[in-house]
Image (spheres, grey):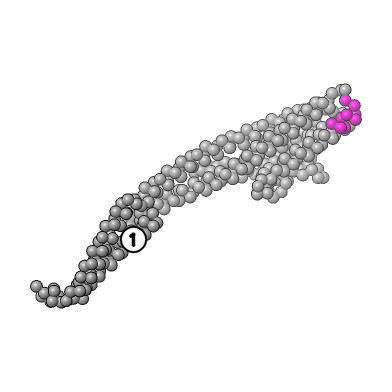
Amino acid sequence: MRISTSWNNQLGLNAMLDQQSKLSETQLKLSSGKKYLSPSENAVAATSMIDLNHNIKENQQYQVNIGAARQRLDLEESALDNAGSVLHRIRELTVQGLNDSNTATNRKQIAMEIDELNKQLLSIANTKNANGEYIFSGYKTDQAAFTDTPAYAYQGDTNQRSIAIGPSRQVTDGDPGEAVFGTVSAAPLTAGSISNVFQAVAQISADLKANTPNKNSLNDMDTALVRFDTIRASAGARLNALDDQENLNADYILDNKSTASDIGDLDYAEALSKFNLQQISLQAAQQAFTKVQNLSLFNYIS
């Protein structure tokens, strides 16, 4: 029987290279923390990881959307709270102006304060968020919701922006200005039937300056206050919905991450044990190769 020295050398070299390859693969897994370095190692696991990571990223985006919607709704709720306080003060002044003990001069003075409060109310209606968007302008967020020159006018639109906060769940992140502050009318105004709060307050001021206050103006104030409370309650309900969905999303993300970890994360204890065994196997292969290199052809002949 003829025995090739090169053949034996090649066998030893192949064994040594195979052990080096296995050791290198285990080292990569230890450094990356991944159970599988390529989809070919476990196609089913790879497909599951793709689906899980997609679900995680999708729900993380929902969380970002919730944060944006909360910022706008918080700002709207705060603006409506301030608007309600201003309007309550205007109503108090209106009641004061209706008192028959007032002189024409007194009523003009009251009207002057009401005018300033109306400006404050208009400023609230033109509130901007941190991105410089007017929150009561519908889709026209680059335009102030209301203007008072040359007359009160609504410059926004009636649209509400819907934001996805979960699978098949959306929430509107604001309300258009005319739904909140009332529709601006170009027709002659009559106290007691004025929808737009700025026009209603301006009418109160004009009546006081003319020394002809109209008690029907209180109806306009009460209607506006009810509208503020209704919209504010709606914003509060949407904020609660955001909180609930945020918790659901967080749980879903955690569950998906846990499952992904079970599928794709490396068992370090098992890997380290395997690594140590592979080191021993490599050392043995190296020693065997060295020994083969030192033998002559005669050592293979029995």
Q: Which residues are magenta?
A: 102-110
Compared to 140, does 110 lie above or below? Answer: above
**Residue 236 visible (yes or no):** yes
- Secondary structure mostly seen in magenta is helix
Q: Position of residue 143 (x, y in %)?
A: 71, 48
Residue position for label 1? 25
Q: Is residue 46 above or below residue 174?
A: below
x, y percentage for residue 122?
Answer: 75, 40
Identity of the residue drawn at 75% across and 35% down: 197
- Mark 1 is surrounded, within 10 Å at the Cα level, by few (under 14), some (14 to 19) or many (20 or more) other residues, namely some
Residue at the image point whose x is 78% and y is 39% from the top? 119
Query: Callout 1, which amino acid?
Result: Glu
Q: Within the magenta stretch, is there residue 160?
A: no
The answer to which quarter of the image holds residue 281 is bottom left
Is 108 a magenta residue?
A: yes
In the shown orientation, is residue 271 left or right of residue 125? left
Q: Nearer the viewer, residue 86 or 11?
A: 11
Residue at 42 percent across and 43 percent down: it is: 255
**Residue 136: % across, % down:** 68, 42
Q: Which quadrant of the figure contains the N terminus?
A: bottom left
Query: Residue shown at 74%/30% (left/top)?
Result: 88
